[in-house]
Image (cartoon, helix red, strand yellow):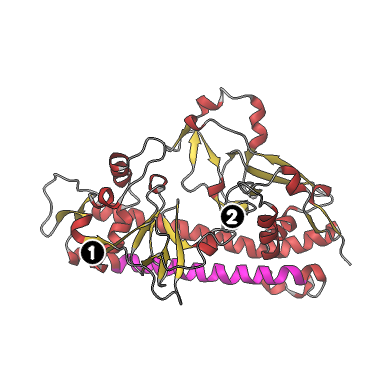
Amino acid sequence: MIEWKEIRNGCAFVSGYAFKGSDFNTKNIGKPIVKIKNIQNDFVTLESSQYISDELLNDYNKSIEKFLVGNEEILIAMTGAGSVGRVGLTNFKGTAFLNQRVGKFMADEVNLNKEYLFNVLTSLYFKKFLYIKGQGSGQPNLSPNDILDVKIPFPAYKEQKEIGKILQLLVKKIILLKEQNLTIEATSKAVFTEWFGRYQLGDELPKGWTAKKLVEIGESIRGKVKNEEGRVVLSAISTGKLIPSDEYFTKQVYSKSLSNYIICNPGDFAYNPARINIGSIGRNNLNVNGAVSPVYVVYRTSKIYGRYIEFLLKSKKFDKHVGKFANGSVRQSLNYEGFAEFTILIPSESMLNKFYSLIDVLDYKIISNNEQIQSLTKTRDTLLPKLMSGQVRVNNIKQIEDA
């Protein structure tokens, strides 16, 4: 019978530092800062991170060095509706600093193995447990003691290490696939820039090119959900994607009834007007009939322009447009009228189709990788309880190592 003990029996914990918001920059200058938003789907990346310059960091006390994190470290979101209790493994080169309300686990490797701890905390049972533990009368929150008080199965350290090793083989395969996806996305962006980035508004354009505002080639969609069956609630996240809400948040953050939600069909764009300034806008590429919160803006254009516009909405040009048309002194917001004023250069349809035929190959590879990631994640979640109970022994699953 495996004994359950508090995490503190084999682990120390550090909560992040309250850096000054005015010191942050988005120019990739200095050290990146890991925030709650960087913890997604069991991993931590530096995508869309803010930075603090080395010069400003020198003004802080040297004790901030204890808030440095490197690769393959276990972090947890300590606050936030829908995010509290979310655990992720860092996956980046170099080092970064922990921001406030993000914590770091430090297994002692005597009583507790890091790889084992990570796989336990990201299991379905503990995802739900940590989220529920963080609930209170106000803002969901976990203190360091709340986290260290959590009881987990504590098999012998040698057995933990064996379990962690075999499960980490699956984790590393997932990491590799995610890294491939990032490389493919960077390649797609480079191809787009090479094909379409040489011309600006006011330039003499090639034959077949035109300049138009988004309002001229699309429309705002305000249609409400009439039939909820099969509708998937979507959320726009800061990495510029539209994903199922249930995959991003650790709880259901949307209403039980979707009758007031706006339809967001395949190919539609959607964003929260109050979060557009951090890149929370995306396109429904999931081949599902989606729905988004009533506060969202949904934009629909013809199929020929969709993928092209998707690239443009991740450009610095669009960021400048948001800065110009967003309003609000405390929190900036961009309504549909401001969004629709974005003027873009549109190539000929024949050129767009040639571009898509090239990009489609890369898109299909990402889809294939994501399917493999889902399969590997499911295998890991199934194996963990069986390994801990002894129902499956490590020696019996050598095929994972050989795969």
Q: Main secondary structure of the magenta part?
A: helix
Relative depth, front residue between 179 and 78: 78
Q: Which mark is residue 43?
A: 2
Work out whether residue 66 can be spotted: yes
Question: Which residues make up the magenta segment?
Answer: 357-386
- The residue lying furthest to the right in this view is 1
Residue drawn 18% across and 67% down? Answer: 350
Relative depth, front residue between 42 and 187: 42
Magenta residue check for 364 = yes
Residue type at the position of mark 1: Leu
Rendered view: 312 above or below 372: above
Q: Earlier in the sequence, mark 2 or mark 1?
A: 2
Where residue 94 sits: x, y (%)? 57, 42
Where residue 95 sits: x, y (%)? 59, 40
Work out whether residue 403 can be spotted: no
Q: Which mark is residue 352?
A: 1
Q: Which mark is residue 308?
A: none
Residue type at the position of mark 2: Phe
With 354 as the anchor, is 391 left or right in this view? right
Number of residues whose C-alpha sits closer than 10 Å to that of mark 2, classed few (under 14), some (14–19) or many (20 or more):
many
Rendered view: 188 above or below 379: above
